[in-house]
């Protein structure tokens, strides 16, 4: 059973990762794409694919580590790595980030002068660049879930 303390730590770590993803997307939009919405969208969609795939790989690595470490004492770096990979996922952070984007764009649409930050992000085109990401996140997450299920089924002798 997951304790309340662990749940709070998961949410806080997802929020921290979500903030880091905001910084990454802002860097991609403002510095790499230099405000070009189409180029920024492509970069952001690429990061989503990378993070969704990374999470799938993390789960495989963690499962192998847990199976291998059951009967032996493990080193501190290995325990730290397992603890990191057992925590909130990057995908959770992405979903939290996109919830914040949806809320931010809704607030800006309802009260454009309420927040200078939201106004600046909207006027720069940042919101336009990141908004397609939520739909792409859901679609790529489901797609890779299905692909990995098909691969496992094929490896176990079933037909895809």
Image (spheres, grey):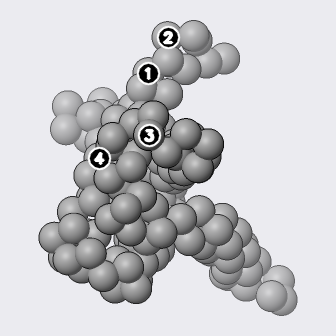
Instruction: Write down the residue under mark 3.
Output: 113
Instruction: Write down the residue under mark 2.
Output: 5
Nearer the camera: disc 3 or disc 4: 3
Label 4, residues with CA under 10 Å away: few <14, some 14-19, many ≥20? some
Could you tell me how far apart the alpha carbons at marks 3 and 1 are, in whole angstroms? 34 Å
Nearer the camera: disc 2 or disc 4: 4
Q: Are marks 2 and 4 in contact (CB under 8 Å)?
A: no
Could you tell me how far apart the alpha carbons at marks 2 and 4 are, in whole angstroms? 22 Å
Label 1, residues with CA under 10 Å away: few <14, some 14-19, many ≥20? some
Could you tell me how far apart the alpha carbons at marks 4 and 1 are, in whole angstroms? 16 Å
Nearer the camera: disc 2 or disc 3: 3
Determine the image quadrant of residue 158: bottom right
Label 3, residues with CA under 10 Å away: few <14, some 14-19, many ≥20? few
Instruction: Write down the residue under mark 1.
Output: 9
Q: Which mark is residue 20?
A: 4
Q: Earlier in the sequence, mark 3 or mark 4?
A: 4
Does 4 sit above or below residue 66? above
Identify the residue at horizontal 32%, vertical 65% (top origin).
124
Q: Earlier in the sequence, mark 4 or mark 1?
A: 1
Across and down, in percent, residue 112 comes to 49, 45
Describe the element under mark 2 as helix, strand or loop: helix
Furthest-top residue in this view: 4
Could you tell me how far apart the alpha carbons at marks 2 and 1 are, in whole angstroms? 6 Å
Q: Earlier in the sequence, mark 3 or mark 1?
A: 1
Q: Are marks 4 and 1 in contact (CB under 8 Å)?
A: no
Residue 66, visible in the rendered structure: no
Residue closest to the eye, 68 or 86: 86
Residue closest to the eye, 9 or 97: 97
Describe the element under mark 3 as helix, strand or loop: loop
Does 87 sit above or below residue 93? above
Q: Are marks 3 and 4 in contact (CB under 8 Å)?
A: no
Across and down, in percent, residue 53 comes to 48, 70
């Amino acid at each position: 059973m997951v304790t309340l303390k662990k749940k709070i730590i998961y949410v806080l770590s997802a929020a921290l990762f979500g903030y880091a993803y905001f910084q990454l997307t802002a860097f991609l939009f403002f510095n790499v794409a230099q405000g070009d919405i189409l180029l920024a969208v492509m970069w952001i969609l690429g990061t989503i694919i990378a993070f969704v795939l990374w999470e799938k790989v993390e789960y495989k690595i963690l499962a192998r580590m847990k199976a291998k470490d059951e009967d032996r004492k493990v080193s501190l770096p290995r325990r730290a790595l397992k603890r990191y990979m057992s925590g909130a996922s990057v995908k959770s952070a992405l979903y939290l980030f996109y919830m914040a984007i949806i809320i931010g764009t809704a607030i800006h649409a309802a009260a454009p002068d309420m927040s200078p930050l939201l106004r600046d992000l909207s006027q720069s085109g940042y919101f336009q660049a990141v908004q397609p990401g939520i739909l792409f996140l859901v679609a790529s997450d489901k797609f890779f879930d299905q692909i990995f299920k098909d691969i496992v089924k094929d490896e176990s002798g079933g037909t895809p």
